[in-house]
Amino acid sequence: MKKIIEGKIYNTETAILLGEYSNGLSHSDARFLEEAVYVTKKGAYFLYGAGGALTKYVERAGNTSWGTSIITVLTEEEAYKWLEKHNKWQVIEERFSSYIEEA
């Protein structure tokens, strides 16, 4: 997926995938949800999200609703928090070492 936001191109095909999550449901299920965090070659972070009609990725028009996909720009901290939430510790250790310390 590709999207231009404020004159900058965010492209899942050319960016580096840092982590992904899927709830494991079929794309035909209205509860289907998948997300992935990427970083561009220039260091900009973004989230690709997709889901069915019963997820936060719903679009509505009148009495009709459907699932969709979006790209959202993230700050470095937001990317880190998403990766932490989804337990992507290897990526965190490699790219976000300044955010963590030994307990």
Image (cartoon, rainbow, N blue to C red):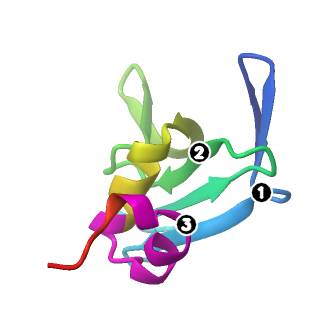
Amino acid on which disc 3 is placed: Arg
Could you say which quadrant of the image residue 83 lies in?
Answer: bottom left
Label 1, label 2: how many angstroms apart (C-alpha)? 9 Å
Of residues 91 and 30, which is closer to you in this image? 91
Q: Magenta part mainly helix, strand or loop?
A: helix
Identify the secondary structure beneath mark 2. Answer: strand
Amino acid on which disc 2 is placed: Phe
Residue 93 coordinates in the image, percent (x, y): 45, 76
Vertical placement of residue 43 versus 100, above or below: above
Which residue matches tag 1?
15
Residue 7 coordinates in the image, percent (x, y): 80, 18
Residue count near mark 1 (Cα–Cα under 10 Å), binned few <14, some 14–19, many ≥20: some
Circle count: 3
Q: Quadrant of the C terminus?
A: bottom left
Identify the secondary structure beneath mark 1. Answer: loop
Which residue matches tag 2?
46
Which residue matches tag 3?
95
In the rendered structure, the answer to whether residue 99 lies left or right of residue 72 reads left
Q: Which residues, given as a range, are shown in magenta?
A: 84-98
Residue count near mark 2 (Cα–Cα under 10 Å), binned few <14, some 14–19, many ≥20: many
Amino acid on which disc 1 is placed: Ala
In the rendered structure, the answer to whether residue 1 lies left or right of residue 74 reads right
Is residue 35 in view from this perspective?
A: yes
Badges 2 and 3: C-beta atoms under 8 Å apart?
Answer: no
In the rendered structure, the answer to whether residue 83 lies left or right of residue 48 reads left
Q: Earlier in the sequence, mark 3 or mark 1?
A: 1
Residue 42 coordinates in the image, percent (x, y): 79, 44
Vertical placement of residue 91 versus 11, above or below: below
| Nearer to us: label 3 or label 1 | 3
